[in-house]
Amino acid sequence: MNYLGYTEDDLYKLGGIHTGREIALQPFLWMNIYSRVNQERDTLKKYLDQALSGVSKVILTGAGSSAFIGRSLKGSYRRLLNVHTIDVPTTDLVSHPLDYLSDNETILLVSFARSGNSPESIAAVSLADKLCKKCFHLIITCDGKGELANYQTRSPKYVFILPEESNDQSLAMTGSYSGMLLTGLLLSRIGNWDAMENAVSILSGYGNRILIGFAPMLHKIASMPFERAIFLGSGPFLGTATESHLKLQELTDGSIICKEDSYLGFRHGPKAVINGHSLVVFILSNDPYVHRYEADLIQSMNKGKKALYTIAVTESPVHDLHFDLSVEMSAAGRQLEEDMLTVPSILPAQLLGFYKSLNLGLKPDAPSVSGAISRVVEGVKIYPF
């Protein structure tokens, strides 16, 4: 079996079998997640209807990559569920709980976690139980044996366990990230389900197109001498840009310094980071209104310092702008709602991180030479509040 251009034997030797396989199998995972949500759809909808009828706020939370899921989802939840929604990492919720939780509010706390064994995961749900008037818990995790999935509470709780293959064994989250993101998107549409099977089929096809059609080019780009990488995305794609920057930085053990920003935000100072050793990745919306802001920023960059290489990640061809590489998921124009595109749009950064890790002589499954970062965060002490 080959994954991302390598045989299994080669990947075992290179220390990248888990990462390579987990990146490559995501389109299949996404279809399996659709089936799992569909199986539990009635009970999920019943629970969400009960929760949303009485809450004043939804908090989307998680740590690290799991927190960036909320950054992509908060707009969808506000629009589609018609409820005030914020994204708050557990790392913020635990250190400053009274900034987000109060005894005069009933909330729905949606917790995302790959293993659910990070200390902040349990601390966050416990604080919500302690400090809120009432808390409904929706726990979305890849590990049914993890501490978060088995959290004991008197509050109403629903635990959704993703298919087993989503529980990445590599250090960097890949399938677990895109899988939980897709789950969150599907739950926001649980009351309007008829179009979801076709939508997931399309985004799975987009994923395969990237993996088959663009992985060889991204492999070549990873061998280029860039030292910085900037990922830009607006709205739901800001979460994608944030996860993209972390993925490349993690998998290269910090050798590549990465940054993320929105298109409008990038103008206000951060644009100065671009130099001749920079890779810039533009994650593009399929909304014509949003694209006007994207195009303005991209065109303005022609007047400043030039990047080493530019990549566009887009649903369909963009004819008004030039990039060194355009990763196009479709030739058929807009087929998916904007926020659904966040799922396949993470793949280019995962591929760049995987290939650059190998290019640097690292092991993608465990790229941290010093052990400074690990699959489950270590050394965090939780204090009583």
Image: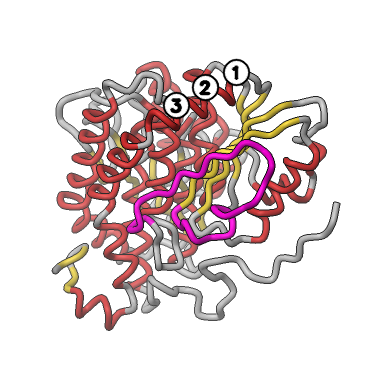
Which residue, given by chain and number where applicable, does mark 3 sit on? 45
Residue 361 belongs to magenta span: no
Q: CA distance from mark 1 to mark 2?
A: 6 Å
Q: Is residue 221 left or right of residue 289?
A: left
Compared with 246, 80 (above or below) is above
* Amino acid bearing label 2: Asp
Which residue, given by chain and number where applicable, does mark 1 sit on? 53
- Residue pushed farthest right? 385
Asked where in the image residue 223 lies, by quadrant, the reply is bottom left
Q: Residues within 10 Å of mark 1 (few under 14, many from 20)?
A: few
Residue drawn at (82%, 38%) of the image: 98
Q: Position of residue 173 (x, y in %)?
A: 44, 58
Q: Position of residue 38 (x, y in %)?
A: 32, 34
Q: Residues within 10 Å of mark 2 (few under 14, many from 20)?
A: some
Which residue, given by chain and number where applicable, does mark 2 sit on? 49
Residue drawn at (77%, 61%) of the image: 382
Residue 182 or 150: which is nearer the viewer? Answer: 150
Which residue range is magenta in the image?
142-166
Residue 36 or 71: which is nearer the viewer? Answer: 36
Disc 3 is placed on an element classified as helix
Disc 1 is placed on an element classified as loop
Sequence-first disc among 3 and 1? 3
Q: Are dots 1 and 2 in contact, CB under 8 Å?
A: yes
Residue drawn at (38%, 23%) of the image: 291
Q: Are dots 3 and 2 in contact, CB under 8 Å?
A: yes
* Amino acid bearing label 3: Lys
* Amino acid bearing label 1: Ser
Q: Position of residue 191 (x, y in %)?
A: 40, 20
